Image (tube, helix red, strand yellow):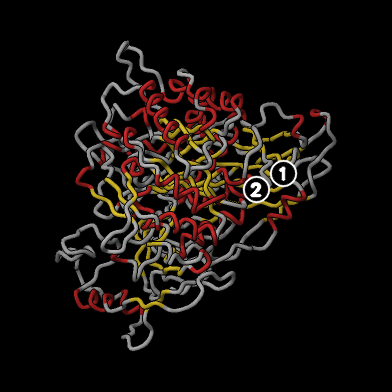
Amino acid sequence: MRLPLFSVLLACLSSTKADVTIYGVFGKTTTVPVQSGTDIPTTTTSYLTTHGPARFTSLAAYNDVYLPPPPIPSPAPDTAFTVNIPNSASNVVGLSIPQAGTFFGFSIEMSVATQLIGTNSSRLFVPFLNLMALVVERAGAVHVRVGGNTQETASMVDSFPDGRILEKDKEDASNPTSTPVLDYTIDLLYMLGNVSSLVNVKWYLGIPFNDTSHLRLEIAEHGEEILGDNLIGFQAGNEPDLYGAFSHGHRNASYGPWDYFGEFSQLTQAYASDTKITRKKSLIAPSTQGGNWPDPLNPANKPMGAEAVWNTGFVQVYDEYLSALAVEHYPNENCADIFPGDSEPLDLLIQLGPYLTHNNGLGQVQPHLNSTMLAQTWGKPFLMFETNTASCGGFPGISDAFTSALWAVDYALQMANSNFTGALFHAGGQNVTYNPFTAAPTNESSFHQWTVGPIFYAALAVAEALGSTNTSRVKDLFPNNGNEFTPAYAIYENDQLARMMLVNFLDDPSGAHDYTAAISVGGQQFGEGNAVPAQVKVKYLLAPSVAEKQNITWAGQTLGGRFQVDGRLKGTEDVQTVQCDQTANTCQIKVPAPGAALVFISDTAQQQAAAPDSASTYATTVVTKTKNTATVDPAVIATSNGQNGKNRGIGGTSQGGENGAVGVRALAATSALVAALTAVLVVGLSASLSAGLLW
C-alpha cells in the first residue's frame, strides 16, 4: 500500500559529531561543529599560483583549490557615486516584465535525485527539505527540475531486486558527458510528491527523447497523476542542438533544427492520443544549449540555438502543446579537464577574472534578447532551464568560491532584467564543483553532513530581492558611469520602488575599495516629490575574499562549512538600519569589496526585512543507536586518526579509493568504530515546524 503523503519518514545521516578539517580561503582550517553561531577558524595561506588546470586528489565537490583574487583594475572605479532613481515604475524606461519570487530555482541531474532528495518516498533527506524551506520562506515557493542528460535515456520499471527506486548503467555511456542509461520506478515520483506535501516545491520533469519512434511517456502519465498542481511541465529534448555534434541521443552528425521539428511532431501526436495525459499544454522546448546546428545543404551556414528553431515556425505549429519556451546555457566549459584528449584544459587563473564583472552577465543574455522579446509576443514564459558557472562540472576555485555567489546574483538579476521568467541552477554529484548543495558521500554519511556551495547563498539573496508578491520588475541601473565592477539593480513591486541590489566585484581586504552609493529616490528630475525614507534596511552577502569557499554569510548567518550543513541557517540574523538624509534626499549605502548589499526601501519591504525567521525545519525519524553502543569523545576521534594514513595507502574511505574523503584519515581500528555506528528506525512523525534536526 502506498504511504499517504504526510506519513513519510525523513532520513538523517547521524547524530554523531566530530571535529572535521575544512579549508578556508587561506588554506587548511580546523573548526569544531557547533549547534548555532558561526565558527571562527584559524588559517594558513595556500593559493594556486601555477598556470594551467588545477590538480587535486579529492572528490571535485570538496577540492582544495584556491585562486588568488584578481588585482584591483587600473584605473579603479570610483568609491563614491550617486544613484538617482524614480520612485514610481511609470517613470522608468526599460523595466522588465513582472517576475515571480521563484525566478531563481534549481536543476537536479536525474541520476543523482536519490543522492539529493531522498532514497525513496518514505525516506526524504532532511537537509534538502530545510534548504528548500529557506527559499520558500523568501519566495513563496521554489521551482526544481529533475532531469538533464540522464533523463534522455530514462525508463520506468516496476521495481529493482534491491528495492532501490533509481539505478544507472554506465556501460552505455557513449558521449562526452558520460551519461548513464537510467532506470527508475514510480516511487521516484511519489518521493517528489512527498517533498511537496511538506515544502512548497514545484517540479519540472523531462520526457526521454533518445528514441522518439518508441516514446516512453510513463513519466508524463504518472507524473501528472501523482504530482498534480505541483507539476509545472515536461521538457521535450535536452540540448537538441548537441544531438548531432556530440552524439547526444545517438543521432546523426547532420541532425538539425528541422529534424528536431519532426521529432517533436512525433511527440505531440503521441501526446494527443494518450488518454492518460490530460494536460496537453505542458511541454517545454526547445532547451537548446546555444551551439551551432549543422546545415548539410550549406556547411558554411551554422544557425545558432533557439533562433534556428523559431525559424522553422516551431512555436506557431506547436502552440497548443507548449506551456513555456526554454534554453540552456553555460558561460564556459571545463570539458577538456574532465575528458582529456580533444582540447587543452583551460587556465584557471585566466578564467577567474571574467566571472567578476558585470559584462559576464550581459554577455550571457545578449544572444537570447530577441528570443525573450519573441516569447512575449507569443505569450510564453521564457526559461533558462539549466545553467551554472561552467559545463562539465565547473571550475575548482571559481564555481565553489564566493566568486560564483556574486556572479550568480548579478547573472540572475540580469536575466530577470532581460525578461527571462526563471533560471534553474544545476546540481550534479560528487564529481562537480558548482553544486548549490552536495550530500556527503554515501560511505561518509554516518559522520559527515552536507556541504552548501556559494550559489545557494545567491539563491537566498535573489529570492529576497524579488520577494513573493510576483509583481517585481527589475531594472539594470548601470551606476558609477556604467562601471563593470559596481553593478546595481532596482526592483519595483506593485509599481513602487521596493528594493535595490548593489554588487562590488572587487577584492580588497584593506577596505580601500569598498564603495558608498548615495541613493536618491524621486525628485524634480523625475517629476516626483523627494521619496527617500527616513531610514532603510540592508542585508549583506559577504565573504573575506572572492576566493573564500566556506566563510560566507547572508545577513550575518551561515549554513556552515564543509560537511557541517543540516540546512538551517546558523547565527543571529544581522539586518542593518541605515539612517537617510531626507533633506538632501539621499541614503548612503556602503558595499564592501567583495560583497553585495540588498537595500529595503519601501515600508512594506522594510517590514519584510525585519520579520522574524519563519522557515519550517524538519526533524528526522532515523537516528544513530544511543544504547549498547560504544561512545568516544569526538575530540579524541578527531586527533587519533594515526600519523600518516595517506602515505600508508588508506587515505580514502573505500578500499583502493584514494579520493574518497578530504580531511578524514582513519586507521583500521577507527574505521571499525565508525562502522559500528549503525542506524535504527525510530517511530514518529517526520515533519516538525519547530524541532531541530537530530544529528
| In front of the other: 33 or 542 | 33
**612 is higher (above) or lower (below) than 240:** below
Q: Is residue 497 above or below residue 241?
A: below
Q: Nearer the viewer, mark 1 or mark 2?
A: 2
What residue is shown at x 38% (from left), y 54% (from top)? 113
First in sequence, mark 1 or 2: give its number: 2
At mark 1, the secondary structure is strand
Residue 552 at x, y percent in the picture:
49, 55
Spatial distance from mark 1 to mark 2, Cα to Cα?
10 Å
Q: Position of residue 584 (x, y in %)?
A: 81, 40
Horizontal arrangement in the rendering, residue 61 relative to residue 309 (left or right)? left
Query: Horizontal and vertical percent for residue 479?
Result: 63, 32
Amino acid at the residue labelled 1? Ala
Density class for disc 2 (Cα within 10 Å; few <14, some 14-19, many ≥20) is many
Quadrant assignment, res 441: bottom left
Whether residue 350 is visible, yes or no, is no
Residue 406's mark? none
Q: Could you tell me which quadrant the N terminus lies in? A: bottom left
Q: Identify the residue shown where x is 45% and y is 18%.
A: 312
Do the numbered discs 1 and 2 sit on residues whose CB atoms are within 8 Å? yes
